[in-house]
Amino acid sequence: MNLWIKNGHLLDPANGRDEICDIWIQDGKVAILGSLSSDKQAEVTGENTRIIDAAGKYVMPGFLDLHVHLREPGFEYKETIKTGTAAAAKGGFTAVCPMPNTSPATDSPEMIQKVLAIAERDSKIHVYPVGAVTKGQAGEEMTDISGMVKAGAKAISEDGKSVMDAELYRNAMKEAKKAGIPVLAHCEDKNMVGKGAMNAGKKAEELGIQGITNAVEDVIVARDILLAKETGARLHLCHCSTKDSVAMIELAKKDGVEVSGEVCPHHFSMTEEEIPADDANYKMNPPLRSSTDVETLRRGLSEGIMEAISTDHAPHGEEEKKKSIAEAPFGIVGSETAYALAVTYLVRKGYLTPMQLVERMSTNPCRILGVPGGNLAVGMPADITIADMDSEYVIDKNTFVSKGKNTPFHGVKVQGRVHYTMVDGEVVYEYKE
Ligand code: DOR
Ligand code: ZN
Ligand code: ZN
């Protein structure tokens, strides 16, 4: 099936295109950009061509989510590769990076192969698995990093926790550099966090819940930047939530360190003050922070210090999230709300232009991971997201295709809707009213 996307507004920062034009897709690739000649129009309106009217919508290179938890194997009651990738497709993502904190952990070439085999069967979008840094994520013994990369891992990460042994982590960074992959870092000092369950501050005191200070993140961000500087590894800092993370990334970049940082939609959309009660749908790690942190994250994204928007999509069971903030697991879902939150809180508020949004959700993530995508030049795979930035609606968790309904954004009014997601020229998600 060929596709003719008509009258859409192409946003392709990699090629500097910001214009209304048609796109013709043949054999899964971008074949023609611009207006089609009448001969070509006659040819493409044949039987084997689907016409998509994209008037009033943006046509963008497909989004890549550098940070999701698909929970399979081991926690299929929370999510599966099938449901998690369907949720991502609905969110406009044509590719995702599942983190290794599954059960067993994704910590060997065999486990990488297993995730890829399930994805091959169950996913309509690209799945780029992330291998663990240590066996069983126990923090003691390094995994077979080059073996995992040969099996298809695109990065390593110990997400869910930090590797507290700096010497071990330094060696892992050297291995990652040799293998040509980035290290995706979850920054949290295990010894400092204690029983902390939300941001340390007035709100935590009010609710009588133990706090997580900014330094819990910042000391590991500093350490990891120094390790990357020494080893030359490519370091990508996950879910940055503090103003000093932004400041340190800016400084490290000026110093020539190969570092990038991501911000999650919840961290740029909501402050700790908006937590209404002891409700675990507002619990994630790192936690919602102060308004000063949120403003700095937005500025960081605006200025390009922070290069990526990733979700940290972390589905959990309903019963688990009914517990108190102190007791419930960390994490909220994010795949199906990321785009609208980015439009509402960043584009509409003037922090990002539509082109910059595409850079943060597609172009830069593809570059950081070193995978194809993030650009729609002729000849490129037709991984495409078509969405608007003005549809207004209220987020309803009951419409989520993810198994996880754990979101603090239920009932929040947003702007921006994904209409189509395409992978290799196949429509893998289509919005129907
Ligand atoms: O909120 C979080 N949820 N943060 C993490 O680091 C782990 C994740 C999860 O796996 O649920
Ligand atoms: Zn994490
Ligand atoms: Zn995570």
Image (spheres, rainbow, N blue to C red):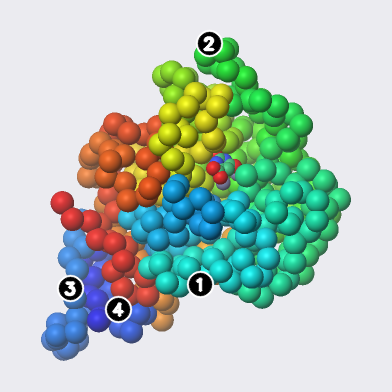
For label 4, the SS is strand
Residue placed most toward the observer, 428 or 229: 428
For label 2, the SS is helix
In primary-sequence order, the first of circles 2 and 4 is 4
Whether residue 298 is situated above or below residue 60 in the rendered picture: above
- Residue 32 placed where, x, y %? 31, 80
Mark seen at residue 25: 4
Whether residue 281 is situated above or below residue 95 in the rendered picture: above
In primary-sequence order, the first of circles 1 and 2 is 1
Going 69% across and 29% down the picture, which residue do you hit?
Answer: 193
Q: List the residue tagged with mark 1.
A: 117
Mark seen at residue 348: none
Q: Single out the mark in the foreground, 3 or 2.
A: 2
In primary-sequence order, the first of circles 1 and 3 is 3
Q: List the residue tagged with mark 3.
A: 51
Quadrant position of residue 87: bottom left
Number of numbered callouts drawn: 4
